[in-house]
Amino acid sequence: MGLSVRLDTPLPAFALRIDERIERGVLALVGPSGAGKSSVLEMIAGLRRPTSGLVVHDDEAWLDTARRINRPPQSRRVGYVFQDLALFPHLSAQDNVAWGIPGPRKERHTRARELLRRFGAEDLARRRADQLSGGERRRVALARALGRDPDVLLLDEPLGGLDATSRRAAIDELRVAIDAVPGPTLLVTHDFGDAADLADHVAVIEKGRIVQRGTPHELGASPASRFVASLVGANTLSGQATARGDGLTSVRLESGTEVVSADHASGRVVATVFPADITLTADEGDGSALNAITAIITGVATLGPRTRVRLEVPEPLIAEITTVSAERLGLMAGRAVIANWKATATTLVATE
């Protein structure tokens, strides 16, 4: 079961133009706030009408502005989990889930209890929505989204604002909902980590346009722009690229610092390197890394077995090393270290 989406409509700051085919599985729409992500979900669901557009599920047109087709939301087999969950606060969890289920009251309530049971929330059935915790409300919202046996599932920032423990539980619950839907799931998020955990494919949206699409691994390995590189967690350093005589490329940064890459490029580029590819040493040593740059530590954050070290080279840079190594080196703010990484770990992206 596939979903074809073509949308063209003005938004306050730019025009939204999307032309995508979404197959079964999960497509994450990733981008910053205000990029048009939620607007896409609203138009697929029928909550908002574009100036022109087409939304076709299999061979059934839900929207076709050229033919003046615009099915109302209740006629589109869509399950929608809103960013704020949008439960009715005065209704019980069971009544919230039963609200959109067709049929007689008794059948709707039986179905609602079944759905709450699926998410381990049957004991919440009689409690009002305004008496539930955030995690409990999310489970009720997921159960409600499945109430009409949707063919398509729309999830708007379902992991926003969660701590690590709550996030793990939420991912398990989301997978239950995703597996229950026969067609595609479209997940909206501003966090690439959420997309990597849940999605088969990622479409990066910036100012109403899809700027790159691929698997999470493909985007991480070959970001197409500085924006995408930053989104997937890479350090980004702007400079001027010139070929060296040994087949490598030299990139002179704004500060005059030189970075070496195994990629071929010339002109203005962004050099990207992931924090985990950078090692820190007290001196240059004799390692194989061609990039060995003196940097000043500006901050150290320990995250269990990993430590993130903020550096100035003088460009900002983040390294991620083991906590054991950080303790052995005695890292602290204000100390000078050598940031080392290989030319093969430096990806060059042409600037626009």
Image (cartoon, helix red, strand yellow):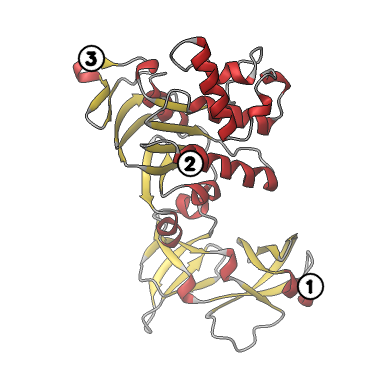
- 182 relative to 164, above or below: above
Mark 2: give few (<14), some (14-19) or many (20+) Cα within 10 Å.
Answer: many
Mark 3: give few (<14), some (14-19) or many (20+) Cα within 10 Å.
Answer: few
Sequence-wise, the earlier of marks 3 and 2 is 2
- 312 relative to 2, above or below: below
Res 153 visible = yes
> The disc labelled 3 sits on which kind of residue?
Arg
Look at the numbered disc 1 and give the secondary structure of its residue: helix
> The disc labelled 2 sits on which kind of residue?
Gly
Residue 214 position in % (x across, y down): 37, 52
Pointer 2 residue:
31
- Position of 281 with respect to 100 (left or right) is right
Sequence-wise, the earlier of marks 2 and 1 is 2
Pointer 1 residue:
327
- 305 relative to 171, above or below: below
Residue drawn at x 55%, y 45% as measured from the top left: 191
Q: CA distance from mark 1 to mark 3?
A: 66 Å
Residue drawn at x 78%, y 66% as measured from the top left: 334
Res 83 visible = no
Look at the numbered disc 2 and give the secondary structure of its residue: loop
Residue 340 position in % (x across, y down): 60, 76
Q: CA distance from mark 2 to mark 1?
A: 36 Å
Residue drawn at x 66%, y 30% as measured from the top left: 136
Q: CA distance from mark 3 to mark 2?
A: 31 Å
Residue 259 position in % (x across, y down): 51, 72
> The disc labelled 1 sits on which kind of residue?
Glu
Counting the numbered discs, the total is: 3
Identify the disc placed on residue 58: none
Pointer 3 residue:
68
- Single out the mark in the foreground, 1 or 3: 3
In contact (CB < 8 Å): disc 2 and disc 1:
no
